[in-house]
Image: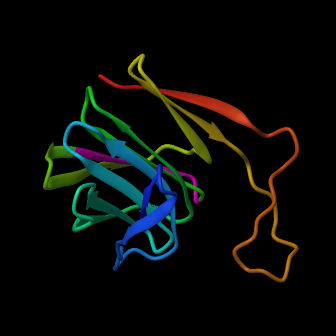
Amino acid sequence: MVVLDPRALEVTSRWPLAPCEDPSGMAIDQQHRRLFVGCGNKLMAVINADTGKVVTTLPIGEGVDANAFDPGTRLAFSSNGEGTLTVVHEDSPDRLAATADDAEPTSMSEHRARHVSVARLEQGLNRSPRPSYRPARPHSLSPIRIGLS
């Protein structure tokens, strides 16, 4: 991860994310200055946004493609390509716990109306030489709305 000075357009710091590999999605808890980074090796890395220190990592599903954070419920979300939604509760800025891993999204958006919207896409048979590739079935996209209480 890099820290940029937007005025000088310069990199001011480089922060290692180990053990996070292949980071993709990121969300922020602005009040507590925590970044939630989705990692390709099935981890969510929680980063101190001021120091770059990895606070903790938590297991998530495979194929993360989006992250979100709801400050009202203190829940962080990881939408995973394998068809799961990982939900993590921020007990304190340095203590987090996974609470759920059971929805079926392929992408996610956060809303202030106390719900998470995800989109489910059915996958077809793999006819490719790449073992992890599974194409989407035509006309199979369906929205899912999950209420937060």
**Pick the front one: 16 or 72:** 16
Q: Position of residue 37 (x, y in %)?
A: 40, 58
Q: Which quadrant is home to the N terminus?
A: bottom left
Q: Position of residue 133 (x, y in %)?
A: 75, 70
Question: Residue at (58%, 60%) from the top-left corner?
Answer: 82
Task: Determine whether 118 is above or below 14 in the image.
Answer: above
Please identify the dominant SS of the magenta region: strand
From this viewpoint, which residue is outermost toward the front? 8
Q: Which quadrant is home to the C terminus?
A: top left
Question: Residue at (28%, 31%) from the top-left corner?
Answer: 71
Q: Is residue 34 left or right of residue 127?
A: left
- State the colouring used for the structure image: rainbow
**Pick the front one: 148 or 140:** 148
Task: Determine whether 119 is above or below 62 in the image.
Answer: above
Question: Residue at (70%, 33%) from the top-left corner?
Answer: 142
- Say which quarter of the image contains residue 134: bottom right
Task: Determine whether 5 is above or below 131 in the image.
Answer: above
Q: Position of residue 141 (x, y in %)?
A: 75, 38
Residue 87 part of the magenta segment = yes
Q: Position of residue 69 (x, y in %)?
A: 36, 39
Magenta span covers which residues? Answer: 82-89
